[in-house]
Amino acid sequence: MRAPALYTAAGSLLLTTLTVAPAGGAPAVPGAAELHGTALAAARAEVAGIAFGKCAAQEDLPANVECGTVSVPLDYARPDGKQIKLTVSRVRATQKDPHNSKRRVPRQGALVYNPGGPGASGMYFPLIGVVPEWKRLAAAYDLVGYAPRGVGRSAPLSCQDPKKFFKAPSQAPTYPSESYKKERIARAKAYARGCARSAGRALPHYNSLNNARDLDVLRAALGEAKLTFMGASYGTYFGALYATLFPSHVRRMVFDSAVNPDPAQIWYRNNLDQSAAFESRWADFREWIAKHDRVYGLGDTAEKVQRSYDKAAAQLAVEPAGGKVGPGQLQGSFLTAGYYDDYWPHRAQALSAYLKGDPKQLIQQAGPHPEAAAEAENASSVYTAVECNDASWPTDWKVWDRDNTRLARVAPFETWDNVWTNLPCAYWPAPRQQARDVRTGAGELPATLILAAERDAAAPYDGALELHRRLSGSVLVTERDAGTHGIGGGPNRCVNGHLDAYLLEGRLPVRRAACAPHPEPKPRAAR
């Protein structure tokens, strides 16, 4: 992504071909105008490059990180129309072998990373090169992060006043009443109106297809003839769209914790599956706490731990901790533990201390942080806009109510919270896209690597299997009996061995490989 040569003879030929409109003046193939717009924007970006320099103070990045911007069309069907700027960060390849400082490592180009979301920024990604598990990659690659459209300073999107974003304390009823549902419907409608009011005509252009097109323009601006990319979570989805749209532009791609790309799943059914998977991961967490009952005293079975959690939620509903941690904040903090098991000791310790009369840790871990409100509101706005724009959603509340009432009977932990997060899509004012069929044929795409944890709740394992089926030549590496969301470059040496072998040498297993789980976290005694 960044600098020298991209559109060579083949790219120039493609650009010339796409410039010729079919008879009648309109593209004959759906998406042809956007494809032409992407080629034109990428050709311009290759010439312009990225003027890297000191990062803006708002980025809060150290001096060794360089920043710049790349211009992309707001609407790829109108590449000469309004342009927006995406912010980009980079740390150059060290070219030093971490095991032998005298040995020089050949540079392999830029490794571009997206952490997911939608709505997450990758601007901090280049800092990861100092972590031991990433040093070999940091030696060979420029580590490149960026803020996707709508995120941070990249044409930022906002749907409500950030000062009103953190509503605390709040409730989190497992089985909400009709009056509570009506209140949340009204809030969802207001939120959707706020997005439309803020973004105006730009609102439909925050979507996954444009994120994939932006990635190709970034590739060109970086001077990369072919893209080396690693996407996590949602980053796997628009990465897969990129592989479908631009298979000949791919060098190497890693899909870490893959979203199910089946068009029928995007996004309503994926969220139902996610709620079901979080119930299983919540059970894993409770079983871990029960195993360490001598440390936490929350119960020696998963059922007893659930009763301890319910007791805390009931107490917080009557008297919020510190006046700002209610059941909603408790549920949100424990939901993050469903993503990352290294949170387990901290959350269990905070719950234990609270039930023993000390709320300080719970307030610290679960309480809202006003200083982060603007960033959190921005991320939420982009998440909502992208998912609502990407595909059709049920517009009848009765469908949502029916499906999630059924699901909550067996998966109460996250179901209704997930509904309230996504409900603005039922009342979305912008036109919806038809989800693209992610698929590549034999020989169209270089070999790609899919990483997945078997018990991942945020991106259930079936998504990795589906992506593996759809991307010809892909290889799936599974971390068995583990559920951390995002496993590349983490604590599992087996997974990292496959990641390094692929990105550094282009070497992969035949079709599939499995790794034993990383060690469970160790309990922490209350201080």
Image (cartoon, rainbow, N blue to C red):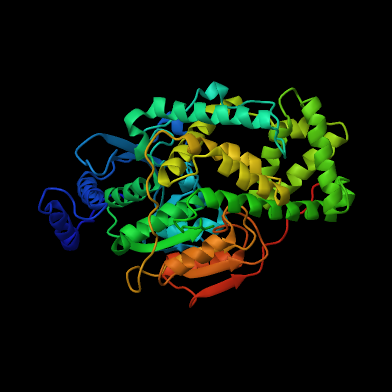
340 sits left or right of 8 in the view: right
Q: Is residue 315 among the parts visible in the rendering?
A: yes
The answer to whether residue 111 is left or right of residue 277 is left
x%, y% of residue 486?
56, 55
Q: Nearer the viewer, residue 148 or 165?
A: 165
The residue at 37%/46% (across/down) is 433
- The residue under the point 25% across, 45% down is 49
Specify the quadrant of the image occupied by residue 95.
bottom left
Residue 42, how many percent across, how many down? 24, 49
- Which quadrant does the C terminus fall into? top right
Identify the residue shown where x is 34% and y is 46%.
210
Residue 265: percent from left, percent from top:
50, 54
Question: Is residue 126 or residue 433 the one in the foreground?
Answer: 433
Q: Is residue 457 above or below residue 123?
A: below
Relative to residue 515, is residue 491 depicted above or below? above
The residue lying at 32 percent from left, 31 percent from top is 201
Residue in front for this viewpoint, 340 or 278 = 278
404 vs 124, left or right, is right
- Name the foreground residue: 66 vs 237: 237
